[in-house]
Amino acid sequence: MATDAPALPRELQLEVTAACNLACTMCLVSYRPKIGKRQGSMSYEMFRQLVDELPGLERLTLQGLGEPLLAPGILDMISYASERGIAVGFNTNAQLLTPERSEQLVGTGLSWLCISVDGAVAETYESIRGGAQFSRLERHVPALTAAVRRRGGGPDLSLVFVAMRRNIAELPDVVRLAARWGVPKVRVQNLSHSFDDTDPSGSYADIRRFAAEQALWTGQDHARAEEAFEQARAAADEVGCELRLPRLDEPGNGAEEGEPVQRGCDWPWRSAYVTHSGSVQPCCMVMGSDRVSLGDVNDTPFGRIWEGEAYGEFRTLLEGDDPPDVCRGCSLYRRVF
């Protein structure tokens, strides 16, 4: 048992399902066998066990590799958490976010909802999010914002744009799209991981190659990305949209010789990620249950895992100059997310 473990987290992320209705080019789901909705979902019993074990829980994110709206108990989970005063939300691809589902969601006490939109036109969007239809976004998102207006309040809404070389030029138009649909915020993020710690010819080879080809942090198309960011800022000012942009370079890169590159992460001290099957991981950025596991809630209560030796060793490595291999290529650790 680690003696210097932090207090139990006030934030938690639960992968309520690993099943997905899409096959997105930047997601590990596209590079693995499909998981069925029943097989890939967290049980409601496990969900309640985790929430009940953390009486100080304040924020709960219900998402992982899958589409949360495929989780059979998602509405009950939201209601249970919100009735306890916990802020709860998730990301969705909105393909299943019918007007009827929107009405249900805004009545559950959901605190925030992020809609993934990685292109301003059907051709780009559908080429990135395999199986998706842009026309559904055009129906579902305005219906969601209308439902929020009718109720006089609801979840905090935003569009999330995963920035890549193939879609960065469309970012300014995505900002305008958000305004047209009635969504007040656009959050732009880089790819989550380089996967440089994995075997180039192993099971992560394809997604590693994709990241090398499409990530903005590689330096390729930097000028074009900066131009798109500047145009997006202008568009946000024009339509009154709140815009969050990521860094393109790691803090400290290009600084005077001898100045250290600033890296780090505080996630293992303040939050945790639990997969649908019960594996406890330091964060969702790991992407892949085989890459690191600090315990299993099927065998051990979460609190004992949080205070245990494996977590303690992971935190110690993360604080040092030689972090765990799985953290080295993480965008959050490198502060470019």
Image (cartoon, rainbow, N blue to C red):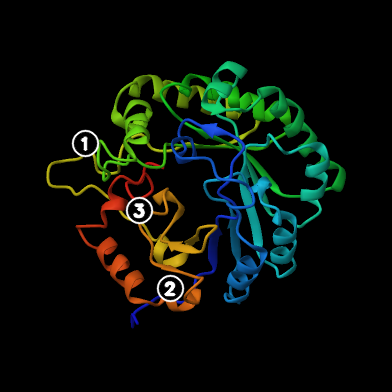
Residue 255 appears in which quarter of the rendering?
top left
Looking at the image, tell me whether mark 2 or mark 1 is earlier in sequence order. Answer: 1
> What label does residue 306 carry, if any?
2
Q: Residue at x 30, y 44 (%)?
A: 329
Residue receiving disc 1: 254
User: Which of the two residues, 5 or 257, is positioned nearer the viewer here?
Assistant: 5
Q: Quadrant of the C terminus?
A: top left
Give the class, few, some or many, for how many residues have Cα within 10 Å of label 3's Cα (few <14, many ≥20).
few
Q: Quadrant of the N terminus?
A: bottom left
Q: Residue at x 40, y 64 (%)?
A: 268
**Tag 1: amino acid:** Gly
Is there any visible trace of residue 153 in the rendered image? Answer: no
Residue receiving disc 3: 291
User: Which of the two residues, 239 or 228, is positioned nearer the viewer here?
Assistant: 228
| Image location (x, y in percent) of residue 42 | 60, 59
Mark 2 vs mark 3: in front: 3
Give the class, few, some or many, for how many residues have Cα within 10 Å of label 1's Cα (few <14, many ≥20).
few
**Tag 2: amino acid:** Trp
**Tag 3: amino acid:** Arg
Q: Secondary structure at mark 1?
A: loop
| Image location (x, y in percent) of residue 57 | 59, 70
